Amino acid sequence: KQQDSMNSRLKLVMKSGKAMLGYKASVKALRKGKAKMVLVASNCPHLRKSEVEYLAMLAKTQVHHYAGDNTAMGTACGKFFNC
């Protein structure tokens, strides 16, 4: 149930047009202080995940660990890259 709630919220954020996808865009937003929240997929490499968490800590931004993998997260966002 919590996963469905997260997916519906993610869909709503994507519809608003204020979301950014991808590692490079996320890091740029964190460095500029524009990011409000970062979602990390469960199969994200450990080094990349720790780098994003460190940048988020410096930017005082919330990090949420998504329960699904990157394909499930992309599908929830409405981007069917690996399907």
Image (cartoon, rainbow, N blue to C red):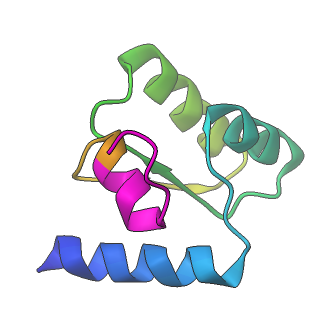
In the image shown, does 21 or 35 lie closer to the viewer? Answer: 21
Residue 17 visible within the image: yes
Q: Is residue 17 toward the left or the right of residue 56 in the image?
A: right
The residue under the point 62% across, 44% down is 56
* Magenta-span inclusion, residue 65: no
Estimate the x, y position of residue 79 in percent, counting from the top left: 49, 57
* Magenta-span inclusion, residue 78: yes
Which residue sits furthest top?
47
Residue 65 visible within the image: no
The residue under the point 45% across, 15% down is 47
Estimate the x, y position of residue 70 in percent, counting from the top left: 36, 41
On screen, 79 above or below 44?
Answer: below
Which residue sits furthest left?
1
Report the number of numbered marks: 0
In the image shown, does 83 or 26 lie closer to the viewer? Answer: 83
The residue under the point 57% across, 33% down is 52
Query: Which range is magenta?
Result: 72-83
On screen, 6 above or below 12?
Answer: above
The residue under the point 22% across, 52% down is 67
Q: Which quadrant, please, contains the N terminus?
A: bottom left
Q: Is residue 19 toward the left or the right of residue 66 in the image?
A: right
